[in-house]
Image (cartoon, helix red, strand yellow):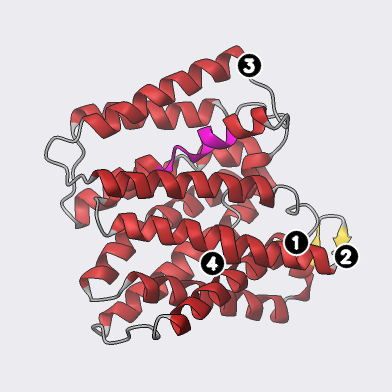
Amino acid sequence: MGPALCLLSAACFGAMAIFGKFAYAAGVQPATLLLVRFALAAAVLAALLLLRPGLRHTAAGPARWTPGLIVTALGLGAVGYATQAGLYFAALQRMDASLLSLILYTYPLLVTVAAVLLGRDRLTLGRGAALGAASGGTLLVLLGTGGVDFHPAAAVLAFGSAATYTAYILVADTVVHRLSPVLLAALVMTGAAVTLAVRALATGGIDLGFAPRGWFWLACIAVVSTVVAMLTFFAGLRRTGPSTAAILSTFEPVVTTVLAALTLNEFLTPVQLAGGLLVLSSAAVVQLRPARPVTAAATAS
């Protein structure tokens, strides 16, 4: 069941870009999408914690909440996750979902580099080769645009999203073992929702004048691609361990690419497909025998 749950999680996360494209087509603005996503996800997670108090406990037993820990968890959402999601959906407005997914998935490699520089991990010969191959793959993805709708500014936003996610993961790694996964995710979602609500109030509110079908796609993003994706990842992670779970998560951009071709008529060029394969293969390789389960926090929210 463990691998199946991890793959289901990756599929749910991979569908998010498709849901986002359909939400934009219904007239939903990015600010509205982000606020509804995090507010609804936070509400669902809070309800789960109320209905199942055992979800508040860590593997070692009841979590010991401290003000600093709670503030850090809220800050992860208010600053890190809100920024990452904002950059991601801003890029999604300007570029194809499949291309965005491949660029975003440079984050496991960025996490590895950052962890090595911070002394949390070590760089082996195999990992060095994987990072070099990933760099070449990313270059192929960007240069092999062909007929794909490509905007340099969107690529910058996408890489910004990957870099922000990297910082988020590294900070989350310091608290993920001290709070239960569901509680941590609920706090992260709440922090992100508060930040986006304040921004909405400061900029005149959010636009709810979109087509009714937009609510369906917003619900899909919040429930399927956030709550269900996260909970199935946690369940799979407990059964497989962080390395296997991280490797299986490379299924995410594959799902995005296939769904984009089936529903949006988006197609990558052969050069981009080759580059994407290099990136995904390298992302899997760098997860082998990690010194610390840094990437386990990656898909936690």
Question: Which quarter of the image is occupied by the C terminus?
Answer: bottom right
**Side (left or right) of 230 relative to 61:** left
Q: Position of residue 242 (x, y in %)?
A: 65, 40
Mark 3: secondary structure: loop
Q: Which residue is mark 1?
A: 180
Residue furthest left as drawn: 147
Mark 2: secondary structure: loop
Which comes before the other along the chain, label 3 or label 1? 3
User: What distance separates the C-alpha of mark 2 from that of mark 3?
Assistant: 37 Å
User: What distance separates the C-alpha of mark 4 from that of mark 1?
Assistant: 15 Å
Mark 3 in CB contact with mark 4 (< 8 angstroms) = no
Q: Which residue is mark 2?
A: 64
Q: Position of residue 267 (x, y in %)?
A: 18, 43
Residue 111 lies in the magenta stretch: yes
Mark 3 belongs to which amino acid?
Thr
Residue furthest front as drawn: 202
Q: Position of residue 155 (x, y in %)?
A: 31, 44
Mark 4 in CB contact with mark 1 (< 8 angstroms) = no
User: What distance separates the C-alpha of mark 3 from that of mark 1?
Assistant: 32 Å
Mark 4 belongs to which amino acid?
Val
Q: Which residues are magenta?
A: 104-112
Residue mark closest to the camera, 3 vs 4: 3
Q: As rendered, which of 286 and 55 lies closer to the eye?
A: 286
**Side (left or right) of 190 relative to 90:** right
Q: Which residue is mark 3?
A: 124
**Side (left or right) of 257 relative to 104:** left
Q: Residue 227 has which mark? A: 4
Res. 264 image quadrant: bottom left
Mark 2 belongs to which amino acid?
Arg
Name the residue located 72 percent from the left edge and 32 percent from the top edge.
120
Mark 3 crowd level (few <14, some 14–19, many ≥20, 10 Å Cα): few
Name the residue located 38 percent from the left edge and 76 percent from the top edge.
32
